[in-house]
Amino acid sequence: MSSALLVGVYVFVLSIFVGFEIISKVPPMLHTPLMSGTNAISGITLVGAVVAAGYSQEPLNIVLGGLAVVCGAINVFGGYMVTDRMLRMFKKK
């Protein structure tokens, strides 16, 4: 494997552990309001994934970029669904 690929895998695995630790420390009361703020960040990540998938010529990079697009789209869609559900809870009946 190339050095750049190893660094990429290392950063990816490290980001999984760091993200899990950060999210697990957020109190449940703050989790849903923070979701609406992170939807914008997920949208930026999705744009970056589209660029990465479309820019590369290597098949592995295209597949990984496509996987990033799918995961980012699921994240954005799920975040908006959770935020919408939270806002419906606060509407008067």
Image: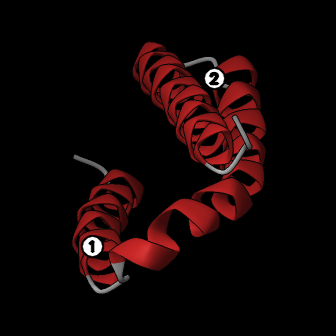
- 71 shown above or below 70: below
**Location of residue 77 in the rendering, given as x and y in whole percent from the top left corner:** 59, 26
Name the mark on residue 53: 2
What colour scheme governs how the chains and residues are painted in the rendered image of this protein? secondary structure
Q: Secondary structure at mark 2?
A: helix
Residue 66, numbered circle: none
**Label 1 secondary element:** helix
In the rendered view, does 15 fall on the left or right side of 91?
left
Residue at image mark 1: 14
Distance of mark 1 from mark 2, alpha carbons?
A: 22 Å
Q: Amino acid at mark 2?
A: Ala
Q: Position of residue 1 (x, y in %)?
A: 21, 46
The front one of 63 and 83 is: 83
For the C terminus, the image quarter is top right
Q: Vertical placement of 1 versus 66: above or below?
A: below
Query: Which image quadrant for residue 51?
Result: top right
Residue depth check, mark 1 versus mark 2: number of the one nearer the observer: 1
Asked if 9 appears above or below 75 in the picture, the reply is below
Residue 62, image x, y percentages: 53, 18
Q: Is residue 27 left or right of residue 65?
A: left
Please give left or right for residue 66 compared with residue 47 in the image.
left
- Residue in the picture at 33% in, 59% down: 12
Residue at 52%, 60% in the rendered image: 32
**What residue sits 65% from the left and 25% below the top?**
56
> Looking at the image, which residue sits at the far front?
93
Q: Amino acid at mark 1?
A: Leu
Residue 47: percent from the left, percent from the top? Answer: 78, 35
